[in-house]
């Protein structure tokens, strides 16, 4: 992601550069990114007051939600608006962030009136809440290191740390030693890196690696369950306890209904296997909070190998337009039911 697309934010870490129109390079030419004055990808400005006759949903998540590699209008949030009459979505998805930062964005946006909160969690996010530094490739392929805010659990209570977030950007050479144990890298759960033991691969591998990538996919599909993200293995793992605390606090603080959505690890898209135990953990969370919940894993596993693989882009490292269409199709009836059963239904009927 080009650095000109992002700007430093002392409370969240980074936001998109406001009021930007930028074409970002992609595997097949590029895609158009527009941001609004608030610093989020959107074709419209985010208004604090309600839009007459509209049911407003605020959507939070990482780059799978903001949709790296996909134009604004092709995202599941924008597709939902076209599917559901009367629905208005504000997409607060933000690349290179975790649920802890999404919670902080929500806290900053409390003045924005809404009827539904949608929290989207990509399975790998469990590692992001436990780290203090993000490692991101710059346009030349070298890694740059950025600080982020983070929470710690003290006697069962969340305590925010590292706010205001330092603006300092480090290189591999200048990164202080005390930060090195706390780095999050996008390559940590790469299947290619996992098998080849190469931990610092560039996210977009040269075409020469295509045969090896396909071999790894086939091996994963045939092998016993490949276990990754052991942080989900048991309910008492520190990483899960922290992620659960963030989400539980967020859900309980919401004055509106909450729809929690989980996206499986990318290995599911390429191999047809779920290498994690995230579903068991999120079921425990949903049972404790009684929020609405959708997990798209069963929908992904129903597909043929060819159709399933079309949901993931190796080049961008993100879900594709067909995946956004699948998510929108899955969410639409649930959101419509929430709309019909909410207190907002009377207000919408009168407008």
Image (cartoon, rainbow, N blue to C red):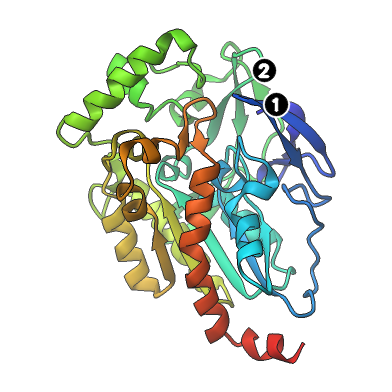
Nearest to N terminus: mark 1 or mark 2: 1
Residue 308 located left or right of residue 66: left
Mark 2 surroundings: few (<14), some (14-19) or many (≥20) residues within 10 A: few
The numbered mark at residue 118 is none
Q: Tell me where residue 22 appears, x and y as whole percent.
A: 79, 33
Q: Tell me where residue 341 appears, x and y as whole percent.
A: 53, 86
Residue 14 against residue 119 in the figure, above or below: above
Q: Quarter of the image for the C terminus: give it.
A: bottom right
Residue to which mark 1 is pinned: 2
Q: Marks 2 and 1: in contact by CB < 8 Å?
A: yes
Residue 32 against residue 280 in the figure, above or below: above
Q: Tell me where residue 190 appears, x and y as whole percent.
A: 38, 27
Q: Residue at x 85, y 44 (%)?
A: 19
Identify the element where label 1 is drawn. Answer: loop
Q: Residue at x 55, y 63 (%)?
A: 118
Q: Residue at x 32, y 37 (%)?
A: 305
The alpha-carbon separation of the residues under discs 1 and 2 comes to: 6 Å
Identify the element where label 2 is drawn. Answer: loop
Residue 290, quarter of picture: bottom left
Mark 1 surroundings: few (<14), some (14-19) or many (≥20) residues within 10 A: few
Residue 22 in view here: yes
Residue 49 located left or right of residue 223: right
Residue 58, quarter of picture: bottom right
Residue 120 in view here: no
Residue 117 located left or right of residue 306: right
Of 189 and 175, the residue lying toward us: 189
The residue sitting at the top extreme is: 208
Residue to which mark 2 is pinned: 139
Of 303 and 273, the residue lying toward us: 303
Of 272 and 41, the residue lying toward us: 272
Residue 275 against residue 183 in the figure, above or below: below
């Amino acid at each position: 992601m080009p650095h000109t697309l992002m700007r430093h934010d002392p409370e969240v870490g980074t936001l998109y550069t406001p009021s930007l129109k930028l074409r970002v390079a992609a595997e097949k030419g590029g895609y158009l990114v527009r941001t609004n004055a608030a610093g989020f990808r959107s074709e419209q400005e985010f208004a604090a007051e309600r839009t007459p006759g509209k049911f407003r949903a605020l959507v939070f998540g990482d780059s799978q939600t903001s949709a790296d590699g996909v134009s604004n209008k092709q995202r599941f949030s924008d597709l939902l608006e076209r599917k559901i009459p009367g629905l208005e979505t504000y997409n607060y998805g933000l690349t290179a962030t975790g649920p802890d930062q999404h919670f902080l964005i929500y806290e900053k946006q409390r003045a924005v009136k809404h009827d539904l909160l949608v929290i989207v969690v990509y399975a790998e996010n469990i590692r992001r809440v436990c780290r203090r530094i993000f490692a991101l490739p710059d346009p030349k392929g070298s890694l740059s290191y950025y600080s982020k805010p983070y929470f710690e659990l003290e006697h069962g209570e969340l305590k925010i740390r590292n706010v205001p977030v330092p603006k300092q950007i480090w290189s591999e050479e200048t990164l202080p030693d005390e930060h090195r144990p706390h780095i999050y890298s996008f390559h940590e759960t790469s299947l290619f890196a996992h098998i080849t033991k190469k931990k610092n691969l560039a996210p977009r591998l040269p075409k020469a690696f295509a045969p090896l990538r396909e071999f790894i996919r086939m091996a994963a599909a045939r092998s016993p369950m490949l276990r990754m993200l052991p942080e989900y293995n048991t309910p008492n793992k520190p990483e899960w306890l922290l992620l659960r605390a963030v989400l539980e606090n967020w859900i309980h603080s919401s004055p509106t209904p909450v729809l929690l959505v989980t996206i499986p690890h990318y290995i599911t898209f390429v191999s047809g296997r779920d290498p994690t135990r995230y579903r068991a953990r999120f079921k425990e969370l949903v049972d404790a909070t009684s929020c609405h919940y959708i997990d798209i894993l069963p929908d992904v596993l129903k597909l043929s190998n060819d159709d399933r693989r079309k949901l993931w882009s190796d080049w961008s490292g993100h879900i594709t337009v067909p995946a956004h269409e699948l998510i929108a199709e899955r969410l639409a009836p649930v959101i419509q039911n929430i709309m019909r059963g909410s207190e907002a239904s009377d207000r919408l009927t009168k407008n």
